[in-house]
Image (cartoon, rainbow, N blue to C red):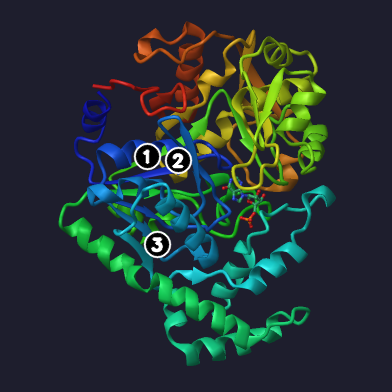
């Protein structure tokens, strides 16, 4: 069934990009897996590093990948997984992921790592942690994985590429040259050379010019899936700067990062969560439930899932290190319907399990913002995948933001200027809530209010919703018949 639906949707498509149109964490992992399993020959990532975390559910197991594209689980079918040249790679983390895959019985013989990708060095991580501009103090609240410093070195032409690891003299010189940029850190060449020399041996067989490989595959008519990381609103070029990551996670940056021009991409599917959305880390979020109170609260790493379950009296069990609970527990539904927006936001977080895959931080929650989605159609294209709509089952009402109020004005075009975004308040349209939709497979059978909101969303954004995800499993997916 899945295969039929995909073949129909991707009839004339050879290069498909699946990217996020919000602040990340919209469920790219599920859709990367969806298209990798039944369609793609090559699955490639082009931006970011292990700041990302894709959650993929296979059978009854949940897996989180930070670096490797979710398609690696189809390695045995001969599918090629690529870590592209726009990425920044922490090799230690990569080796851990590979080890874990092997232990679980997966192979990775068709993995390809770009020789031009940049390497996250220990001093990048140290610098990121030291300068992490803690979100608590109103800062960005980076993931602390060394992403920003590594990209900074790349831009100032001092970066270390994967290929440099195979050339001891170049590597030694580069490390010695970099010292002046990190005056507060003790950078010793020998231990680094030793450590990275060993890493180089381990990854040697997988390194190549992946851009060339992908361009050739494209010419040969192979099916290529480009998997985005983070999201448009976190893009260094199109996001809410400086509250962004350090790569361009738009279509352009993502295609660039795998070595293709964006004009080579035949279809772009932009994922958004709907009718609620999330943000991790600092920065503006006009529709946030609980506003500033929520932003400050979510900057505290201690308010993890277990804390919230206990505080709000939601029945749960701790199994191993994980809290198990029923996301549709009546206590959570009560919270989603609370008149206190902050509590409503916590309720949505618990109902949808919105805690960082990489950092476990509580994600900030709010209503879906069609103004940012409209902006996304203009940069990434008009097609949308909506995810997590099922998580709001039991809510009496939901809202979608169709404009920002700024004094007497109503803005309908997104401005990424944080000074403007901090001062606007959302203009909402409210809709009737709905019950469980996870068993629905036909778009027409979705609740009338949800369809009405989607129609309004499409009219406002000029986009088209092609897929609605109604659960984490591959099968829990509605592909709309647009013919
Ligand atoms: P960095 O990418 O670690 O430098 O973090 C910069 C900002 O991007 C922080 O606000 C992070 O929370 C956010 N960020 C980075 N990666 C992700 C992601 O995969 N999902 C959501 N937010 C992210």
User: Where is residue 358 shown, x and y percent of the image?
Assistant: 61, 47
First in residue order: circle 3 vs circle 1: 1
Residue at the spot of label 2: 29
Indicate which label's residue lies in the foreground, 3 or 1.
Answer: 1
- Would residue 339 be found to the left or right of residue 125 on screen? right
Is residue 208 visible in the rendered image? The answer is no
Q: Quadrant for residue 443, please give it.
A: top left
Quarter of the figure with the C terminus: top left
- Quarter that holds the N terminus: top left
Q: Give the label on residue 33, or none.
A: 1
Where is residue 46, by image quadrant?
bottom left
Q: Residue at x 73, y 52 (%)?
A: 141
Q: Position of residue 239 (x, y in %)?
A: 59, 49
Q: In the rendered view, would you say 84 is above or below 471?
A: below
Q: Quick one: label 2, few (<14), some, or many (20+) residues within 10 Å?
A: many
| In this rendering, position of residue 466 left or right of residue 122 | left
Residue 147 visible in this rendered orientation of the protein: yes
Q: Nearer the viewer, residue 192 or 386?
A: 192
Which comes sooner in the sequence, label 3 or label 2? 2
Q: Give the CA distance from mark 3 to mark 1.
A: 18 Å
Query: Is the C-beta separation of discs 2 and 1 under 8 Å?
Result: yes
> Does dot 1 land on a helix, a strand or a loop?
helix
Instruction: Measure how far apart labels 2 and 1 are at the Cα level.
Output: 6 Å
Q: Identify the residue under disc 3.
A: 84
Mark 2 secondary-structure assignment: helix
């Amino acid at each position: 069934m899945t295969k039929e639906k995909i073949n129909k949707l991707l009839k004339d498509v050879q290069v498909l990009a699946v990217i996020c149109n919000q602040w990340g964490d919209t469920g790219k992992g599920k859709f990367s897996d969806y298209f990798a399993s039944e369609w793609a020959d090559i699955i490639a990532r082009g931006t970011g590093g292990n700041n990302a975390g894709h959650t993929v559910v296979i059978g009854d197991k949940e897996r989180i990948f930070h670096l490797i594209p979710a398609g690696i689980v189809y390695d045995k079918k001969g599918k090629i997984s690529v870590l592209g040249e726009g990425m920044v790679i922490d090799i230690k983390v990569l080796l851990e992921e590979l080890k874990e895959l092997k232990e679980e019985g997966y192979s990775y013989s068709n993995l390809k790592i770009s020789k031009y990708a940049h390497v996250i060095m220990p001093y990048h991580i140290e610098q990121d942690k030291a300068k992490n501009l803690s979100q608590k103090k109103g800062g960005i609240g980076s993931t602390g994985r060394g992403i920003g410093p590594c990209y900074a070195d790349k831009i100032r032409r001092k970066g270390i590429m994967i290929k440099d690891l195979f050339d001891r003299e170049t590597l030694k010189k580069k490390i010695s040259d970099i010292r002046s940029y990190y005056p507060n850190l003790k950078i010793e060449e020998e231990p680094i050379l030793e450590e990275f020399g060993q890493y180089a041996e381990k990854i040697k067989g997988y390194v190549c010019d992946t851009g060339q490989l992908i361009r050739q595959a494209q010419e040969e008519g192979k099916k290529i899936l480009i998997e985005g990381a983070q999201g448009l609103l976190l893009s260094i070029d199109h996001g809410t700067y400086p509250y962004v990551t350090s790569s361009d996670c738009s279509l352009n940056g993502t295609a660039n990062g795998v070595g293709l021009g964006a004009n080579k991409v035949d279809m772009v599917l932009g994922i958004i969560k709907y009718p609620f959305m999330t943000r991790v880390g600092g920065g503006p979020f006009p529709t946030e439930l609980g506003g500033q109170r929520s932003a400050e609260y979510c900057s505290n790493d201690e308010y993890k899932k277990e804390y919230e379950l206990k505080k709000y009296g939601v029945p749960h069990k701790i199994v191993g290190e994980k809290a198990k609970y029923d996301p549709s527990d009546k206590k959570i539904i009560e919270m989603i319907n609370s008149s206190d927006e902050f509590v409503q936001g916590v309720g949505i977080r618990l109902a949808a399990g919105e805690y960082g895959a990489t950092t476990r931080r509580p994600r900030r929650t709010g209503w879906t913002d069609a103004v940012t989605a409209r902006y996304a159609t203009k940069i990434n294209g008009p097609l949308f995948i909506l995810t997590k709509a099922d998580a709001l089952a039991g809510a009496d009402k939901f809202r979608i933001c169709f404009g920002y109020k700024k004094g007497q004005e109503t803005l309908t075009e997104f401005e990424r200027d944080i000074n403007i975004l901090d001062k606007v308040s959302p203009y909402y349209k409210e809709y009737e809530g709905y019950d469980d939709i996870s068993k629905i497979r036909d778009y027409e059978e979705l609740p009338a209010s949800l369809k009405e909101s989607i129609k309004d969303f499409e009219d406002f954004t000029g986009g088209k919703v092609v897929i609605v995800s109604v659960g984490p499993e591959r099968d829990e997916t509605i592909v709309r018949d647009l013919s």
